[in-house]
Image (cartoon, coloured by chain):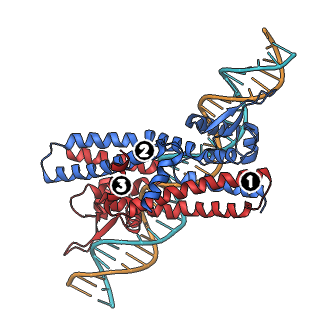
Chain colours: A red, B blue, C orange, D cyan
Amino acid sequence: MNLQTSKQKFIDTWGLLGSEWGINRSVAQVQALLLVSTEPISTDEIMQALTISRGNANMSLRQLLDYGIIYKKVIAGDRKEYFIAEKDVWKWAVKIAMMRKQKEIDPVMNVLNELKEETKKDKTTEGKEFYKTVNDIQSFTEQLCTLSDKIFSSHRGELLLKLLKMIM
Amino acid sequence: MNLQTSKQKFIDTWGLLGSEWGINRSVAQVQALLLVSTEPISTDEIMQALTISRGNANMSLRQLLDYGIIYKKVIAGDRKEYFIAEKDVWKWAVKIAMMRKQKEIDPVMNVLNELKEETKKDKTTEGKEFYKTVNDIQSFTEQLCTLSDKIFSSHRGELLLKLLKMIM
DNA sequence: TTAAATTTTCAATATATATTGAAAGTTTAG
DNA sequence: CTAAACTTTCAATATATATTGAAAATTTAA
């Protein structure tokens, strides 16, 4: 298998994983393509490499720029925009995790807190059971978020390595 | 807001979160409904409570049973099947995490390992760069999986609590 | 047995999500 | 300025995913 085929396999696999985890396939593929590109590439090159439309390529690039996991790169003497990927896995993984937490976990946590507040004073068995269920999920999630915040906010995972050593 | 309304809000929120993370909305809602039910409930009651079809209710229940996060409950003198949820958040969270790792992460890790194997001997700059990219992702993921395995395999999160204390 | 109750299956259908592509908007070289 | 190069937008369309519902299969009470 040659390198180009390997790169294609990487792009396809990454796209599939994304779609299984609620990240648009094209977006994941564009990130993958940029990750395995040695040179900055333009929208036209992305369209060609992934056989996607200009609109799709543009929207995927904007989303990745918003996430802060790819960058624009100016090429002297060329009007086109070129793009490169953040290559440090830690950096981009942290950004994706933070973004998804903020966009999807935090709103759920807010609802759970509201539900706790609303049922706190309910003294029926049913009310107390509901409160407990919500509270269990809420405090479990909070613990996981706290731990992952700590791990991700420590530079380049030194904390993770320390923790791994500690518990092995 | 009364308890029934709160329960409905919980079910809706849980269904939305599921769909954002690649878990079928109905499946997530059925789990949520069982989590907030004080009594075992039947397929018909689920259909009515969530206004979903018999086929959908049945398939969602089978999936949750497969995951091992809900159980069948026999009610004496009744031919119908009744269902209850695993209420221990740790237990069901671990099962969901393990299942998704096996189904979605492990196959990706296998591809990454294959790609490393295929490009290990490539001595071109491009080949070495690709190898590094794949290796970075692969070893990062491996570290996270190792840590989460340790946390999740320790009973009811005592390890998580220990880790949290340690790093605060 | 057998027939009513219950569960399962899956082709048809509906819904949600992703993608296209061309028109509109913006930027820049000359 | 202005026209070509380039980017963005978004209604139309295509694709993927979820859901239905009725027929088939299975189970069980009598």
Q: Nearer the viewer, residue B62 or B69?
A: B69
- Which chain does the residue under circle 2 lie in? B
Above/below status of B29 relative to D26: below
Task: Report the residue at 66% width, 36% height from top.
Answer: B58
- Which chain does the residue under circle 1 lie in? A
Looking at numbered disc 1 in the image, what kind of residue is underneath it? Lys
- Name the quadrant of the C terminus of chain A: top left
Tell me the residue that label 2 is attached to: B150
Q: x, y (%) of residue A72?
A: 30, 70
Q: Nearer the viewer, residue A107 or A63?
A: A107
Tell me the residue that label 3 is attached to: A160
Neighbour tally class for label 2: few under 14, some 14-19, many 20 plus, Cα within 10 Å = some
- Which chain does the residue under circle 3 lie in? A
Tell me the residue that label 1 is attached to: A128
Looking at numbered disc 2 in the image, what kind of residue is underneath it? Lys
Query: Is D11 on the left-hand or right-hand side of C28?
Result: right
Above/below status of A61 relative to A24: below
For label 2, the SS is helix
Residue A51 showing in the rendered view: no
Neighbour tally class for label 3: few under 14, some 14-19, many 20 plus, Cα within 10 Å = some
Q: Quadrant of residue D8?
A: bottom left
Query: Which of the numbered marks, if any, corresponds to residue A5?
Result: none
For label 1, the SS is helix
| Among numbered discs 1 and 3, the one appearing first in the sequence | 1
Q: Residue furthest left?
A: B123
Both marks 1 and 3 on one chain = yes
Q: CA distance from mark 3 to mark 2?
A: 12 Å
Residue A119 showing in the rendered view: yes
Q: CA distance from mark 1 to mark 2?
A: 32 Å
Q: x, y (%) of residue B102?
A: 44, 39
Q: x, y (%) of residue D5?
A: 27, 73
Task: Tell me whether circle 3 and circle 2 mark residues in contact (CB < 8 Å).
Answer: no
